[in-house]
Image (spheres, rainbow, N blue to C red):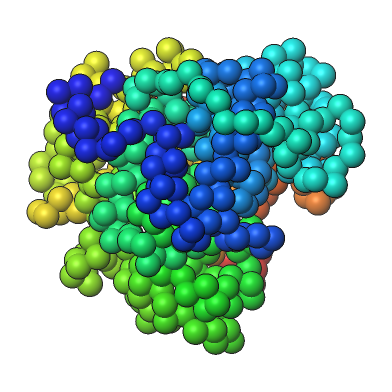
Amino acid sequence: MTDPEIFEPLIRQFPSPLLGEQLGTWASRYTSSIALIDKDETLSYQALNERVDRLAAGLFTLGLHSGERVIVQLPNSCTFVTLLFALLRTGAVPVLAMPSQRAADIDALIALAEPAAYVIPGESHAELAKQVRDKHACLRHILVAETSHNERTFTPLFSLQGERCEWPHPDVADTALLLLSGGTTGTPKLIPRTHADYSYNFSTSAKLCEINRNSVYLAVLPIAHNFPLACPGILGTLSCGGKVVLADNASCDEVMPLIARKKVTHVALVPALAQLWVQAREWENSDLSSLRVIQVGGARLDSTLAEKIITTIGGILQQVFGMAEGLLCYTRLDDPRSTVLNTQGRPLSPYDEVRIVDEDENDVLPGKIGQLLTRGPYTIAGYYRAPAHNAQAFTIEGFYRTGDCVRCDEWGNMQVVGRIKEQINRAGEKIAAAEVESMLMRLPNIEDCAVVAVPDPLLGERICAFIIPPPVHSNIQQWREYLGNMGISLWKIPDQFEFLYHWPLTAVGKIDKKRLVALAAERYVENSR
Ligand code: OOB
């Protein structure tokens, strides 16, 4: 838990830190100003608030009560935001799943969170929903967002309407929502964020990013992710009376004209997407001059690409190094160019504590590389229902072991140099090597396998699977299909397959993954000749 002596005074600055109630405050302040725009509709603050009231009452009448979990798996849309606030208002706890997650992930998530309901967009997820409902007795309801959906055993989301009623009031220190962790172990981890810490997260971020009533925030990354949700994201923008434009498609052909039409001022990107935007500017000439702040984070941003973002897209570039577990580092809007190009910024809050330590967890000398440990007002003190993992992931003083290797300059700016934990960061999506390995081991004729992250100019990192022994008839396409049929989320299917007779080993006899990474890069070049 965050030290109450620090946190209590911080949180008193909010009239009501309960997330569901805050929307009511914003609606009375910003009334008919536009809050949300998606491809189908535009909602004012008041209209959004009324819709949230009705849906919350409907959810409550359905029997979804305070503390119960609800998996939300929806694309960026007004419906997503309405549902999020409605759940927060009733005290039910949204578990935010990514739209592209499939059976294996959702199944594991349900086993962990034991939700009472699962909300799906429509037909695309109907089979999956039926499968998990048959398997997990906890799931009392499947709610479906598409109005045209006609599966009778599912409940249409917007059939749930009621009159505003009195909800049981949660405590500000209660879990408001559960975010998905990038994960390193192969089993999902859920991150409990409280009303108080999340409010602090987005409102302090909004201030730092100079969000105000005239700001127009474009959500192009999936808003189930902490970055576009609350850093400052849609919540930070709504808290200041700004306008949120929700895109459910990141294609430059659609998004760039949208920026011009809606006069977007703020946007958050991962480096892979930023790269596509830079390339697209060779032929795409929409007027992007409204853009004030372009946030890039989630994975390492190469300084050459950073430079190109500034010259081809314009606006102020802001690097963001963050994690769903809490700590956020930002470059500041008035930082010198070299800081913005070469560092991932410094902590958001003066109360964030950071330590950079060696293998024995002694502080390294200033400027040296080590693992980042952190504790602070909005950083969690433990994952949801994970006592064994928590004992490893947190020190006894309550510092979170981030697994990130960083160095810190004399002004406190972080440079992320890699990860000690084996996690693949593919275009901002975090994938546990162990999870892909266990899937591969279920394929026929595979003796052993190892999965590594290989630096990739477009994806940041690609997934390379090494397999022993080389197959008699290599059929990589068939393997990809097998993996897809197993229900593995598509972005976790290896981009590159390589075959070996023996592993390269380290001195103590472990598989030498560093060597594998080098080998993957060499073979990739050879094969592309
Ligand atoms: C964000 O959150 P997560 O939880 O998906 O991933 C966190 C991990 C970090 O521990 C680090 O390994 C990596 O992603 N990361 C970066 C980075 N930002 C995150 N690595 C290098 N450079 C960066 N700028 O990814 C996230 C959450 C909130 C805001 C921004 C990103």
The answer to whether residue 157 is above or below residue 148 is: above
Q: Quadrant of the rendered structure where residue 276 is?
A: bottom right
Residue 33 position, x and y percent, is: 46, 60
Q: Nearer the viewer, residue 56 or 80?
A: 56
Residue 486 position, x and y percent, is: 78, 34
Q: Is residue 298 left or right of residue 365?
A: right
The answer to whether residue 489 is above or below residue 295 is: above
The answer to whether residue 325 is above or below residue 408 is: above
- Residue at image location 79% in from the left, 31% down from the top: 155
Residue 297 position, x and y percent, is: 40, 55
Residue 205 position, x and y percent, is: 30, 50
Q: Nearer the viewer, residue 108 or 224?
A: 224
- Residue at image location 78% in from the left, 22% down from the top: 133
Q: Nearer the viewer, residue 83 or 511?
A: 83
Residue 437 visible (yes or no)? no
- Residue at image location 73% in from the left, 18% down from the top: 140
Q: Nearer the viewer, residue 103 or 471?
A: 103
- Residue at image location 57% in from the left, 39% down from the top: 52
Count numbered badges in the picture.
Answer: 0
Residue 406 visible (yes or no)? yes
Q: Is residue 304 left or right of residue 468?
A: left
